[in-house]
Image (cartoon, grey):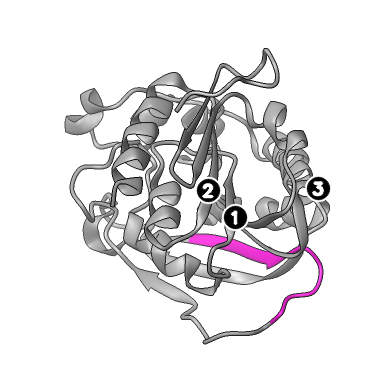
Amino acid sequence: MTIQAASPLIKDVRQIGPATLYLADCRAVLPMLSDVDVVLTDPPYSSGGLHRRDRVASPVSKYISTGQRHLYLDFEGDNRDQRSYGFWLSGILALAHAASRPGAMAAVFSDWRQVPVSTDAFQAAGFTWRGLVSWDKTLGCRPQPGRYRAQCEYLVWGSRGPWSFEGAPAPGAFTHSPMTGGRKLHPTAKPVPLIRDLLSIAPAGALVLDPFMGAGAIGVAAVETGRRYIGIEIDPHYFEIAADRLAGAADG
């Protein structure tokens, strides 16, 4: 269901079961939100190369093998250097911090290159950093001749203030192929089973906020596990993909 946007900067708002989706820059939406239980998101972390000329290349050329590039559209915001990425991310996480309730969980994806600046931004925004979770992408990640594969990505996680430390313990490392469930619907998509695993320590019925929705994997996992979801995406193409996926998840 399409609902009236509260700002001209918000191009579309849709209510799909327990999910609310915004087509907008997340900075236009986050100041309107409150009482978020979980911030879980996968920002465009401007990596994918050792040198600046590599990092500012198009995301599809950085993250997708040559024979698969025609299947994807590029997306914005993945060409910042490390210093500017840290400034930008800390500002957005500060808005997410303000929208969260005390004790809320927060977690942000990163690759190995951006872990240092991501942990800085996480803490600069006001969140308490509590550790790293690793995602082993298996041998499904791109091979690198003569080198170790960049086989893991990471989740910087913590909370807004004190953490309850209740419930069953969860692993600190997860193994899922990026191709779990078939072809990815976004160049940097995370597999839904991975997100379901990560949400295992989130409260039942929690409100999950994702300022960088992409193709909606976090939203699908949230809805499938009985949680509410707010997703924000700036790109109309990926917004529509996410809306279709969330409609399927909400229908059960």
Disc 1 target residue: 207
Q: Give the label, 3 or 1, closer to the camera.
A: 1
Q: Amino acid at mark 3?
A: Ala
Residue at 20%, 42% in the rendered image: 183
Residue at 44%, 20% in the rendered image: 236
Which residue is at the front of the view, 244 or 171? 244
Label number found at residue 98? 3
Label number found at residue 229? 2
Asked if the residue under mark 2 is in contact with the one under mark 3, i.e. CB atoms within 8 Å, the reply is no
Q: Is residue 172 above or below residue 161?
A: below
The location of residue 132, given as percent across then percent down, is 58, 69
- For residue 191, side relative to residue 30 (left or right): left
Circle 1 packing at 10 Å, graded few (<14), some (14-19), many (20+), is many
Residue at 59%, 24% in the rendered image: 24
Residue 160 inside the magenta-drawn segment: yes
Q: What span is colored magenta in the figure? A: 154-164
Work out whether mark 3 precedes mark 1 in sequence or the reverse, and give the earlier one: 3
Rounded to the nearest angstrom, the CA distance separating label 1 from label 2 is 6 Å
Q: Amino acid at mark 1?
A: Leu
Q: Amino acid at mark 2?
A: Tyr
- For residue 252, side relative to residue 101 (left or right): left
